[in-house]
Amino acid sequence: MPLSTCKARIVFALLGFLVAGACSAAEPVARVRVAFDRNGVTDTRAEGMADVAAGRRLTADDPARIASISKLITSIGVMRLVEAGQLDLDADVSSLLGQQLRNPAYPDTPITLRMLLSHTSSLTDDAGYWNVPLGEDSTSITSQAKAWDAKHAPGTFFRYSNLNFPIIAQTMEATTGERFDRLMQRLVIRPMGLSACYNWSGCDEAAYARAVVLYDTEGKSVRDDLQGRMPGCMVIAAKDKSCDIAGRWRAGRNGTLFSPQGGLRISANDLARVGRMLLGDGVIDGRRILSPASVRALATPIWTYANGNGAIIEEDEPNRGGFFCSYGLAVQHLARGNGSTCRDDLFGDGRPRMGHSGNAYGLLSGLWIDRAAGTGVAYFATGVPNDSTGTHSAFSAVEEGLAAGR
C-alpha cells in the first residue's frame, strides 16, 4: 500500500509560500520505512521531500537527526567499553568522572551507569540537558536541586531523562580520554560500516548534501537545513561565540556537546544495519560488534511498570504518554504493558519487541526488532506532531502506520 504524503504543503513550499493548514497536520512532509531480517533488507518504502526548498526527494540513504534512537547507539558504545574492561555498569560513576555525582536528597547512594542507561538514576530534565556552551562544565546543571528527583532514591524509580546521556558521554570520555563524537566513530560507527555521526561531526560532504531537513507541522524548517554545507559550529558555541572545539574541549566535563541523547545523524538503511547486528547476536556481515552476552543484556528489561514505580510518559511532551512500560540499557521494550494504563503495543500484535523510539523537531522515528521472529523495522517521518493518536497504543497514528507498513 503506498505511503501518502503532504502534497499540498510541499507544492506551496516549493512555490515559496508557507501555508498553515494546507493539509492534515498528521500527514508527514516525508517518511521512510525499511524492513529487514538477519540476512538483509526485505522491503524499502520512501516518500516525500528530504529538502522541500531544494526539491530533493527522500531516500532510505539520507541521514536525519534520529532523536532518541541515538541513546541506543550510545549504549552499544558503552557495552563495547564494558567488554574491553574499561567500564563497569555497576561502579560509582563519581569515581570515573573524578567529581561527585549525587542526588542531594540521597547523598550516600552511588549512581551507576546501569542507572543512567535505564533512566533510574533520579536525574531529571528540569534544569536542562543540552544547553551547556563549549568550555563550560555540566555541573552547571547537575549542581541545581531541580536537576534531581528528591522523592525517589537512585535505582528505585523510572523517570525518562535526557540528562542521563550527557553524563554517560562524560563517563566514556573520562575513562578513555577521547572525545565522545570520535569515540563513537571508533567503537561503533566505523566498525559497523555506518555512514553516521553525532552532531554532524565525522560525516562528510556527501552526507551534508543528503541531509534530511526537519520541519514542524506548519512546514517550517527547524533543524538541519544545511543547504549542502557543513554546520558553522557542531556544538553550542562558547559564551564569546567562538567555536574552538579542539582548544576548549576537556575530557569528562561537558557531555552535552555532541548530543548523545538525540544528535545522531543516520539513515533508515543504516538504522536497519544496527537492527540486523542485534538480530545477529552482535554480528553484522561477518564482523562481531558485541558479544552474545552483551546483546542479551540489552535484550533484558531492567525496569517494568508496576504499582506506580515509574513515570510512563515523556514529561517534556505533555501530548504523549503511556508507552514507557519496560526499559533496559537504553533499550525500550514493547508489548509489556497491561493494555490500559500502559499502552505500549505499537504493532498491535502482542509480540514483545526491543529497540527505541524518537521524537524531536517534528520528527518521529523508531527502530524495533522481534528477536524471536528474526525481523525488524526502521523508520522515520518528518513534519508530524508528537502525539498519542494511535488506535491500539499510546504511540501516534503515524508511528502505528509506519510500524505496520501502512
Image (tube, grey):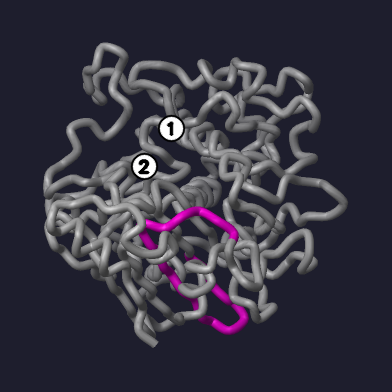
- Residue 24 higher or lower than 93, as above or below: below
Answer yes or no: is residue 280 visible: no
Q: CA distance from mark 2 to mark 1?
A: 8 Å
Question: Does residue 220 show up magenta in the picture?
Answer: no
Report x, y in % for residue 296. Answer: 63, 64
Quarter occupied by residue 164: top right
Residue type pointed to by label 2: Leu
Extreme residue toward the right, this view: 307
Q: Nearer the viewer, residue 311 or 154?
A: 311
Quarter occupied by residue 159: top right
- Residue 386 higher or lower than 245, as above or below: below
Quarter of the image with the C terminus is bottom left
Query: Mark 2 and 1 residues: CB-CB less than 8 Å, in contact?
Result: yes
The segment highlighted magenta reads 367-388
Task: From the image, tell me which residue sits under label 2.
Answer: 183
Task: From the image, tell me which residue sits under label 1.
Answer: 173
Report x, y in % for residue 217. Answer: 38, 53
* In-image side of 365 versus 207 (left or right): right
Q: Secondary structure at mark 1?
A: helix
Answer yes or no: is residue 87 visible: yes
* In-image side of 253 versus 239 (left or right): right
Report x, y in % for residue 256. Answer: 43, 31
Residue type pointed to by label 1: Glu
**Residue at coordinates 26% horizontally, 41% vertically from top-left?**
201
Q: Which mark is residue 386?
A: none
**Residue at coordinates 77% horizontally, 41% vertically from top-left?**
157
Extreme residue toward the top, this view: 240
Q: Secondary structure at mark 2?
A: helix
Quarter of the image with the N terminus is bottom left
